[in-house]
């Protein structure tokens, strides 16, 4: 897929074992609850039902990550988590990760990519809406471990 101009400098690839330290450090720096542990990341790296993506650009080795889940027999994939380094935000890293997640989901013949997001996460919600995601269903009350509510979003992958 041709990257959009804003994401042309960002490369996205599948994560490897050597990325584990960066993945865990970003997860701990970014999220206060519902964290993916080192052991879980390690399992996801080897799993057919998970895809861990890593974004990098120029000489910066690691700028962000996204975690996508697939389910046997399901035509929809789930963007479980996405994060970019705080100093790298607003430069297209999140966009590139979502575009790569969509490409991977299409490759696996998924017809939709869905996700949940904290109802107070305005920057993430803006990004999802800009990329064509729309809200589905009712608010999920107390969806997260810390009791925060979630919106569900979905994008049909043509
Ligand atoms: C949500 C998150 C992943 C977005 O990542 P990001 O790398 O900042 O994403 P982008 O840079 O692609 O997009 C952010 C904004 O920068 C803008 N942008 C993208 N490329 C740009 C560029 N080259 N120049 C200027 N602005 C740019 C986008 O238009 C976007 O604007 P918007 O807020 O109006 O949508 C990031 O803020 C983050 O890690 N947040 C903490 C974790 C989190 O909340 N994750 C989501 C829930 S799991």
Image (cartoon, grey):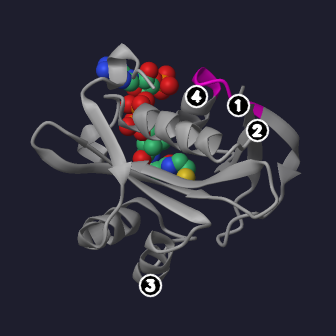
Instruction: Say whether marks 2 and 1 touch (CB < 8 Å).
Output: yes
Foreground of the two, 61 or 111: 111
Find residue 126 and name its label: 4
Q: Quadrant of the C terminus?
A: top right
- Is disc 1 surrounded by few (<14), some (14 to 19) or many (20+) residues within 10 Å? some
Note whether 30 is above or below 98 in the view shown.
below
Q: If you read the primary sequence from the N terminus, does the residue marked by circle 2 or circle 1 appear first?
A: 2
Earlier along the polypeptide chain: callout 1 or callout 3?
A: 3
The residue depicted at 60 percent of the width and 32 percent of the height is 128
Q: Earlier in the sequence, mark 2 or mark 3?
A: 3
38 lies left or right of 148: left
Q: Which residue is mark 3?
A: 39
Answer yes or no: disc 4 within 8 Å of ligand 1.
yes
The picture places residue 3, in percent across and down from the top left corner, at 39, 23
Q: Circle 3 sits in a helix, a strand or a loop, which is it?
A: helix
How far from the left and from the top, in percent, is residue 147? 71, 67
Q: Quadrant of the N terminus?
A: top left
Q: CA distance from mark 2 to mark 3?
A: 30 Å
């Amino acid at each position: 897929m041709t990257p959009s101009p804003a994401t042309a400098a960002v490369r996205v690839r599948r994560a490897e074992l050597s990325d584990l330290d960066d993945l865990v450090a970003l997860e701990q720096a970014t999220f206060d609850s519902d964290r993916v542990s080192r052991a879980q990341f390690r399992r996801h790296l080897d799993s057919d039902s998970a895809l861990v993506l890593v974004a990098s650009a120029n000489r910066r080795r690691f700028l962000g990550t996204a975690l996508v889940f697939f389910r046997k027999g399901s035509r929809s994939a789930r963007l479980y988590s996405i994060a970019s380094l705080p100093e790298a935000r607003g430069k297209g890293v999140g966009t590139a990760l979502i575009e790569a997640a969509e490409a991977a989901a299409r490759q696996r013949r998924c017809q939709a990519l869905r996700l949940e997001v904290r109802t107070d996460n305005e920057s993430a919600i803006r990004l999802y809406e800009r990329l064509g995601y729309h809200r589905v269903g009712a608010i999920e009350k107390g969806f997260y471990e810390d009791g925060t509510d979630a919106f569900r979003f979905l994008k049909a992958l043509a």
